[in-house]
Amino acid sequence: MNNRAEEAIDILFIEESPEYVQLLGEALNSQGTDRFTIIHADRLRTGLKYLAEKSFKVVLSDLVLPDSIGFDTFAILHDQAADTPIIILTSLQDEQLAVRTVRAGAQDLLIKGQFRPPSLMRAIYYAIERHKTKVRIQRISLIDDLTELYNRRGFYALAKQQLKLASRAHQELTLILADLDNMKFINDNFGHAEGDRALQSIAKLLKTSLRGTDIISRLDGDEFTIVALGASEYGALAILKRLYENIDRHNRNNGRYQLSLSTGSAQYDYQENPTLEDLFAEADKALYKNKRQKLSKITQAP
Amino acid sequence: MLNQSGKYPIEVLVVEDDPEFASMLEAILSEATSGQFNPVLVETLEGTLIRLQKQDFDVILLDLFLPDCQGQQTFRKIIEVVPEVPIVVVTGMDDKSQAIQSVREGAQDYLVKGDLDVNQLIRSLLYAIERHRSRRVLQDLSFSDELTGLLNRRGFLSLAPKHLKIAQRANWELLVFFIDLDELKKINDNFGHPEGDQALRAVANILRETFRTSDVVARIGGDEFIVLAINASDASIENITARLHENMDQHNHSGDRFRISLSYGVARFGPQEQPSLEEMIIQADQALYDNKRRKHETNQGP
């Protein structure tokens, strides 16, 4: 048996009737070797509060609660607890609703009075396993294999979400585009494997120069983006300064070639509420300017 | 009730060697649900594999213990052939670790014969179909390149071996094209990244028009594309490259701001050779490199 057997399985149970919760809890814990720790919430709002405070292995919830009824209960729950598998336990015998709920992402839907505790226990185990697979596939669809940064899809998905947050909370946000100036040179002179290593180095430098909450992505070959929520224009300058310092340090330890990065940034202003495309275009323009300045410096050099 | 695709009835392959249990399942599925399901019975693994070649099923109800194969092997052999079909395991053995292992390897559910009722069985099948569909959508996403809609590197590495097997079994010739977009860097630097992205999309379209839908066409890096064409005897290298040039010219006369120029290298493998995927890519890449050098020398020539 797997080694999860010894630790308790934490369950959030959102259900109006405390008696039902107690009954099922006892039944589950009399089944086998696993211990189930059940936290009870008697309404959706309480359940959401617990979800924000603590992580659970699985959420069990009725669709009919004092403060929410029907499919919406699941939709709200799913929105707030995307990282946790959800099993619906309900008395509503509506097959259309059941299929719709599973389609929308519920791991299972059991009808009260129509299942015995072993079935529920199995449903819990399988929900946890299937959810792991789902998260793994979801992750690889958003992550760049080479650098383990977000890929283009990940960038758009997360950047849009961050922009929404900035707009809702009237927060500052900076978008930075960065691109490796001499990718082609590295590829042509040292081979593609070295080019890959250079990209991985840049990824590492970006990670160490930024906060854990910043969204760093590799869009394509040598294009990188950073979304820093809460960063002011001044904050963005501090980020770039740290980044360039780290690159310099890296270059001092690498004799074969130097990494050179061009950057451009755009500042989100909630009063103007620009779209991601607007910000992107602005940052791209700044990046272009940065590149041209570098180029003219080189060509004007005596 | 209809399933999402509106397909009706739902085709279920019931794999069960116990005649009594099999006819009970058949009765439940064909009668109790007033024609929502259309069950087809088979008793052996061999029978299952033959049947799966003849007909598409929406879901498979699978006993793991068959006369010609037992245990997890049964599941593995079937999912390998039809990963697109959801499988619900139904078995007499209530073994938790086996159940979890099955779900971990991709089974949608694991039902225990002694603990099964009609409603539960039907729901399990319906939910399996829904969940599996969502999983496939995610998986397809993880295999596709967001920018061009072609396969990405992961998609190529996962699909190509299957096509390789088919080619070897059918004694077909194999062509591998390594293609790259010249001067992407210049387009990016002179016109901005959105135009660079546009150029990559244009290349994807050119490749889609040039190759057949049965060929594996992927973007595996910034400006690098790879195509695996099997059974290409009807389409010689000359034909394909002529078409490629034609489609390129057509684009370049369409009034876009930038010209698209592609470099490519081709590697051909006879049906008797059994190259590894890696060898094929290396040879095609080498051919591309040689072509590029030749191009360069001609341009710099006296």
Image (cartoon, coloured by chain):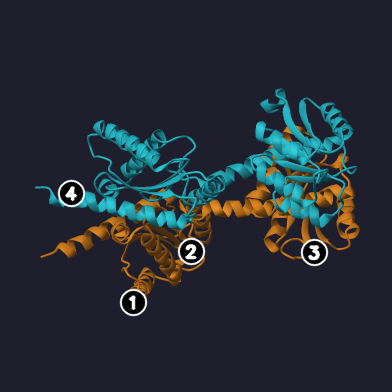
Q: Are callouts 3 and 2 both on one chain?
A: yes
Q: Do the residues at discs 1 and 3 belong to one chain? A: yes
Viewer-proximal residue, A7 or B77?
A: A7
Which of marks 2 and 3 precedes in the sequence? 3
Where residue B113 appears, x then y in whole percent?
85, 42
Q: Nearer the viewer, mark 4 or mark 2?
A: 4
Q: Is residue B18 left or right of residue B281?
A: right
Local secondary structure at mark 4: helix
Q: Amino acid at mark 4?
A: Lys
Badge number at residue A297: 4
Query: Foreground: B154 or B214?
Result: B154
Picture coordinates of residue A201 (x, y %)?
A: 35, 38
For label 2, the SS is: loop
Residue visible at 65% across and 55% down in the picture: B84
B229 relative to A250, above or below: below
User: Mark 3 against mark 2, which lies toward the viewer?
Assistant: 3
Q: Which residue is mark 1?
A: B253
Q: Kindly identify the amino acid type of the residue bearing the numbered disc 2.
A: Asp
Cβ–Cβ under 8 Å for marks 1 and 4: no
Tell me the shade of chain A: cyan
Label 4 crowd bin: few (<14), some (14–19), many (20+), radius 10 Å: few
Chain coloured orange in the rendered structure: B
As rendered, which of A157 and A16 lies closer to the eye? A16
Look at the numbered disc 1 and give the secondary structure of its residue: loop
Name the front one of labels 1 and 3. 1
Q: Which residue is mark 3?
A: B9
Give above or below for A226 relative to B212: above
Label 1 crowding class (10 Å Cα cut-off): few <14, some 14-19, many 20+? Answer: few
Q: Amino acid at mark 3?
A: Pro
Sequence-wise first label, 2 or 1: 2
**Which of the two marks, 2 or 1, is nearer to us in this view?**
1
Kindly report the distance in space between the C-alpha atoms of the residues bearing marks 1 and 3: 51 Å
